[in-house]
């Protein structure tokens, strides 16, 4: 099940990986000389993702979109021009630092309002400020760029980044696609708030994360949509959807702002599931604790616009009308994946296993199979459905191509259920889920954090077999 709740791999014309195709812009001479931040944080599966030497607190993106062929007749593909203002704090002395950006043409870069040198090196935009930055210093880097954003093909052969649709575009980021449409520190460990203002042609709607602050018609008849995300967000959960949508704002408990955008062709098929949004949010709060954000919703595109559903923050994206289980899965990710974000891509099971387990609990609460029955069926007959179920342990995907596959999802959920079995107390189990979501709210966590948390909450119980056999063990574990 590659990517979030995806039912089959994406197959299609594969584009060359954007990491190898970035054009070389030239500005003032520059480049790291040993005192710059690292070009990558050393993620075990995506080592070039993110950058060292600084921590981002805010992204301000001002974007203008012109559709390409097939949409209003513009030539040579979609065109995007943008200004990205990145506010960050230096975590070491910096004479240079990197931003992740693939493709696009960089026009100029400033740091603290002063022209900075820059050069391109694969997916890295290397920036040299006119004056070195001191450790602890907060600074602002402004990048002006334009071009036709690229679609990125991942090691698992799925496509992300800039995905043209029949009436616009869908920009998705997991795991590396966000660098196709804005420069940044693109790794889950660096979360930030966002302001995104997008100007689009008349008749199109631009949807992003968070809350819609304004919708303004410009002098030339285009429309600017301004979105604000106050809570920290990993860049892979940032998204942009541009097209013709039917927009509703359903009432949700607790004063949450709700925004749902549906392609008109999917309205009838989506209506029943989307009507349950308030119910699903309320159910999830009962099981996982208070909703972690101020906004909620969904985006439903045509089937084929993306090959998978994705837990983009505040409003997940669905390729066609979702079934209720997939809908529950993506809403559960607002707690597990978006609020509590894996510290590295090795820790993916922490979000996918918990979101898959949420499906099991929902099915049980709806009168279907219990979570215990789901676990037993998967243990006894899981390979009938998932041939690769036991190929690797959830905490040790074999490569970047496997971080979003069946063992991460299904075996990840089985690890959660084994914890529940050892606790042998449902009140203690749900208290643990609430506590985990609260302890790392709006932060990051890794597998060691989780195992330590479980053992601290139940110090008199032995979880060694859960970790050794189910979380890290090779092959099918012994019957519990």
Image (cartoon, helix red, strand yellow):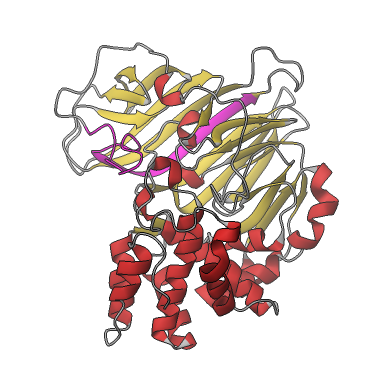
**Along the line of sight, which residue is nearer the eye, 459 or 40?**
459
Indicate whether residue 217 is drawn in magenta.
no
Q: Is residue 101 above or below residue 282?
A: above
**Along the line of sight, which residue is nearer the eye, 329 or 209?**
329
Say if residue 104 shows up in the picture: yes
Indicate whether residue 62 is drawn in magenta.
yes
**Picture coordinates of residue 65 (x, y %)?**
63, 26
Image quadrant in which the C terminus is located: bottom left
Q: Is residue 98 above or below residue 90?
A: above
Residue at 45% x, 63% y: name it. Answer: 412
Left or right of 307? Residue 16 is left
Q: Is residue 179 above or below residue 441?
A: above
Left or right of 302? Residue 150 is left
Query: For the view shown, which residue lies furthest in the right direction?
Result: 268
**Picture coordinates of residue 156 (x, y %)?**
49, 39
Numbered marks: total: 0
**Picture coordinates of residue 130 (x, y %)?**
23, 21
Magenta-colored span = 37-65
Residue at 39% x, 82% y: name it. Answer: 422
Quarter location, residue 429: bottom left
**Picture coordinates of residue 433 (x, y %)?**
45, 74
**Along the line of sight, which residue is nearer the eye, 406 or 333?**
406
Residue at 51% x, 29% y: name it. Answer: 152
Residue at 49% x, 43% y: name it. Answer: 174
Q: Is residue 310 above or below residue 71?
A: below
Say if residue 339 shows up in the picture: no
Quarter location, residue 110: top left
């Amino acid at each position: 099940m590659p990517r979030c709740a995806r039912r089959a791999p994406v197959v299609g014309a594969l584009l060359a990986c954007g990491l190898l195709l970035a054009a070389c812009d030239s500005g003032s001479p520059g480049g790291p000389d040993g005192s710059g931040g690292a070009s990558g944080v050393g993620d075990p599966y995506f080592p070039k993702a993110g950058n060292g030497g600084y921590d981002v607190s805010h992204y301000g993106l001002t974007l203008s979109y012109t559709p390409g062929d097939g949409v209003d007749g513009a030539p040579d593909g979609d065109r995007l021009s943008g200004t990205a203002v990145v506010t960050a704090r230096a975590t070491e002395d910096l004479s240079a630092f990197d931003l992740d950006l693939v493709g696009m043409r960089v026009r100029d870069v400033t740091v603290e309002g002063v022209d900075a040198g820059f050069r391109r090196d694969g997916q890295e935009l290397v920036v040299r400020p006119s004056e070195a930055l001191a450790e602890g210093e907060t600074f602002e880097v402004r990048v002006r760029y334009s071009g036709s954003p690229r679609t990125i093909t991942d090691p698992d052969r799925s496509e992300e980044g800039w995905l043209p649709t029949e009436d616009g575009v869908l920009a998705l980021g997991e795991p590396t696609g966000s660098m196709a449409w804005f420069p940044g520190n693109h790794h889950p460990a660096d979360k930030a708030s966002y302001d995104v203002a997008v100007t689009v042609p008349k008749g199109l709607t631009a949807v992003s994360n968070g809350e819609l602050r304004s919708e303004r018609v410009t002098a030339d008849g285009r429309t600017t949509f301004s979105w604000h995300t106050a809570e920290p967000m990993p860049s892979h959960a940032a998204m942009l959807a541009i097209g013709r949508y039917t927009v509703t704002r359903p009432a949700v408990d607790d004063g949450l702002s709700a925004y749902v955008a549906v392609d008109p062709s999917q309205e009838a098929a989506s209506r029943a599931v989307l009507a349950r949004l308030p119910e699903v949010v309320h159910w999830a709060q009962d099981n996982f604790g208070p909703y972690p954000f101020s906004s909620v919703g969904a985006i439903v595109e045509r089937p084929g616009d993306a090959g998978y559903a994705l837990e983009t923050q505040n409003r997940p994206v669905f390729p066609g009308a979702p079934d209720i289980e997939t809908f529950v899965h993506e809403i559960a990710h607002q707690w597990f994946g978006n609020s509590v974000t894996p510290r590295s891509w090795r820790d993916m099971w922490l979000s996918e296993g918990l979101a898959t387990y949420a499906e099991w609990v929902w099915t049980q609460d709806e009168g279907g199979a219990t979570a215990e029955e789901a676990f037993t069926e998967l243990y006894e007959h899981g390979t009938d459905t998932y041939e690769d179920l036991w190929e690797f342990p959830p905490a040790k995907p074999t490569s970047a191509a496997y971080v979003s596959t069946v063992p991460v999802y299904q075996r990840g959920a089985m690890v959660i259920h084994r914890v529940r079995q050892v606790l042998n107390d449902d009140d203690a189990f749900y208290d643990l889920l609430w506590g985990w979501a609260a302890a790392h709210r709006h932060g990051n966590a890794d597998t060691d954090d989780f195992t330590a948390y479980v053992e601290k909450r139940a110090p008199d119980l032995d979880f060694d077999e859960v970790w050794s056999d189910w979380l890290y063990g090779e092959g099918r574990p012994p019957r519990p």
